[in-house]
């Protein structure tokens, strides 16, 4: 080790010890309140956990385990350094470790479901490689809905998965199906839905039916060719595969209109910023009042007399458990609730924004029994995403996202599905399921609670980033952004001051967030490094479901652009809920 390197390491170790000794004043006061003669005993820790952390179920056995894990500091209890390390450590996460705790016995339509869009693409929508790898990655993360676009191969004798009429290179369907079977239940036992966008001739439909049946065998849920009257529950479908598609039209016709529209608009798409564009506000500026406003991706005549029904191969039709499509007519007909059967309806993000202006309550009512899928508009050729709240506040179960990239919208998706043990199914709030008083997304409700967030300090960048990553000649200048993603009345972002030349920044700033719909709110946290001459550098992010946020002083791990947890980077924060 050179003298210069040694000097840098020594100075940092000294700085870190000082950072521990110079814990935020509030942390010191809390420690003094629950300790005697500089030591926090089991009794003191018990009182701290109950009174400050609001952990009413904390036991003396649990407290003793915490103290035992820091006994190298002091064998009789926690000194200030040990207490500080405990607060900043893995034993003190911001979300409760509850596992799957929602009622999983309601119909599928009562849940938000972790949903992918064009799940086979490795990159952009126009020229990237199609592969089973992004499907595997999505399943490992807990995604429960996989979308496959199926087309005849070049020889017209087999089936490929690709984004049609683009330069994307295909992958064989059978390879995707086998990977789905292998990885479907690695992250969660709850059912995986495969949505098929079908561009096949009847003979290839029969081939798909054979592939699907042979690949999945007994784990395939096949209720028969008739539509279900009510969707089964996630609990009853554990470790089952479900097929959802629409009865296809004539060979290769399904996407012609949409593709023409997309080709004329593709030049409008722009690259996202280094860490993703700011999540767009939810606005309804257009009115959809006729059938011509309906997007073409999933438009399908559900009239029993449609000739497309007669081209459907019987063994293929029997595989379809969740029938999809759009009836003839406008939005009123699309959102009509049939008492005798359930179905899946798809709309683009733009189409839903338009429908929300005039048919917001009808959309919520539709989603109480039926499944509603939202997908990215066609000009998102860079595989970017939209604000998922447009779907969730209208009860949409399947808010389909491009999972292969990164960006703020995708961070929200990751955050939502951290809830309920990360199983990929999150029970919708009761107000979205109330059929007697249907929720109106356009009505601003009163404030239910106020979330107080204190950002004390952060650490770990020195370990997870190269020492010249942020600045070649001086320590970084960090600031934090904290805010809410939720209904429009709740959505906001706030910012701390920038602290110059500090690897261990101590902001000690408090923010208040009034919440009208806390059930749908997500806490957004980002750290950036200020750069006077260039774009600010990314320093970490996370998104947390407020419904599962633990009160008290917590260590909040931060993630990379792609949503992977850093080894060391975390913030020390405090969360309190107060009456409005």
Image (tube, grey):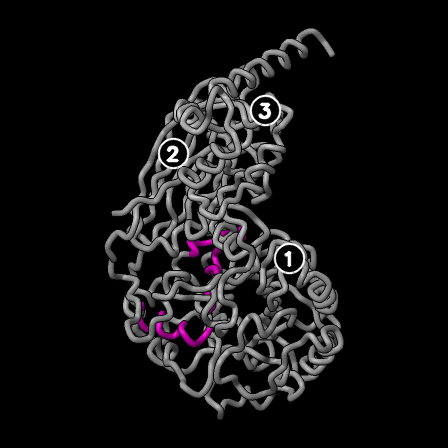
Instruction: Depth check: give the residue in front, 442 or 36.
Output: 36
**Which residue is under mark 3?**
462
User: Which of label 3 and label 2 is nearer to you?
Assistant: 2
Residue 248 visible, this angle = yes
Give the labeled residue for mark 1: 187
**Element at badge 1?**
loop
Q: In the displayed image of the protein, which residue is found farthest to the top?
A: 3
Classify 349 as above or below 227: above
Is 421 placed above or below 239 here? above
Q: Residue 380 at what x, y percent from top left? A: 49, 55
The residue that appears at 38% across and 75% down in the rendered structure is 366
Q: Is residue 550 magenta?
A: no
The N terminus lies in quadrant: top right
Q: Nearer the viewer, residue 456 or 25?
A: 25
The mark that comes first in sequence, 1 or 3, is 1
Q: Which mark is residue 454?
A: 2
Query: Which residue is situated farthest in the bottom direction here?
Result: 305
Label 2 – label 1 distance at C-alpha: 33 Å
In this image, 359 relative to 184: left or right?
A: left
């Amino acid at each position: 080790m050179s003298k210069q390197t040694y000097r840098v390491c020594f100075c940092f170790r000294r700085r870190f010890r000082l950072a521990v000794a110079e814990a935020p004043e509030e942390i010191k006061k809390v420690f003094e309140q629950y300790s005697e003669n500089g030591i926090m005993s089991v009794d003191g820790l018990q009182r701290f956990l109950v009174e400050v952390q609001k952990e009413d179920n904390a036991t003396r056995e649990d407290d003793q385990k915490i103290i035992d894990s820091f006994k190298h500091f002091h064998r009789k209890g926690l000194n200030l350094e040990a207490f500080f390390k405990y607060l900043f450590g893995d034993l003190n996460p911001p979300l409760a470790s509850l596992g799957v705790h929602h009622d999983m016995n309601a119909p599928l339509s009562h849940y938000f479901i972790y949903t992918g869009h064009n799940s086979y693409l490795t990159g952009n929508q126009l020229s990237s490689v199609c592969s089973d790898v992004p499907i595997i990655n999505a399943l490992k993360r807990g995604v429960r809905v996989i979308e496959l676009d199926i087309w005849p191969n070049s020889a017209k004798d087999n089936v490929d998965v690709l984004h049609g009429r683009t330069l994307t290179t295909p992958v064989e369907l059978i390879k995707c199906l086998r990977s789905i079977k292998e990885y479907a239940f690695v992250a969660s036992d709850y059912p995986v839905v495969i949505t098929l966008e079908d561009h096949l001739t009847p003979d290839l439909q029969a081939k798909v039916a054979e592939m699907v049946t042979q690949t999945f065998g007994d784990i395939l849920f096949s209720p028969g060719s008739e539509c279900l009257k009510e969707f089964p529950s996630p609990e009853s479908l554990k470790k089952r595969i479900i097929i959802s598609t629409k009865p296809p039209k004539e060979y290769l016709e399904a996407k012609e209109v949409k593709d023409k529209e997309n080709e004329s608009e593709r030049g409008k798409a722009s690259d996202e910023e280094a860490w993703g564009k700011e999540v767009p506000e939810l606005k309804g500026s257009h009115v959809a009042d006729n059938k011509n406003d309906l997007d073409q991706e999933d438009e399908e005549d559900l009239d029993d007399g449609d000739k497309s029904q007669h081209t459907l191969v019987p063994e293929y039709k029997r595989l379809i458990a969740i029938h999809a499509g759009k009836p003839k007519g406008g939005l009123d007909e699309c959102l009509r609730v049939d008492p005798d059967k359930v179905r899946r309806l798809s709309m683009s993000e733009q189409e839903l924004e338009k429908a929300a202006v005039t048919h917001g309550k009808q959309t919520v009512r539709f989603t109480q029994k039926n499944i509603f899928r939202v997908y990215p508009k066609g000009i998102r050729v860079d595989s970017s995403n939209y604000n998922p709240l447009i779907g969730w506040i209208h009860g949409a179960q399947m808010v389909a996202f491009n999972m292969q990239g990164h960006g703020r919208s995708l961070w929200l998706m990751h955050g939502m599905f951290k809830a309920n043990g990360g199983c990929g199914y999150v029970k919708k709030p009761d107000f979205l399921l109330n059929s007697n008083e249907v929720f109106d997304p356009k009505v601003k409700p009163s404030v239910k609670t106020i979330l107080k967030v204190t950002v004390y300090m952060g650490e770990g960048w020195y370990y997870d980033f190269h020492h010249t990553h942020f600045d070649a000649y001086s320590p970084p200048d960090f600031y934090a952004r904290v805010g809410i993603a939720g209904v429009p009345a709740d959505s906001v972002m706030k910012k701390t001051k920038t602290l110059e030349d500090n690897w261990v920044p101590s902001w000690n700033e408090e923010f208040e967030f009034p919440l009208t719909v806390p059930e749908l709110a997500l806490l957004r946290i980002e750290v950036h490094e200020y750069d006077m001459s260039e774009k600010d550098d990314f320093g970490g992010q996370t998104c947390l479901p407020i419904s599962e946020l633990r009160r008290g002083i917590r260590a909040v791990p931060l993630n990379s652009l792609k949503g992977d947890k850093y080894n060391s980077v975390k913030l020390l924060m405090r969360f309190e809920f107060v009456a409005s």
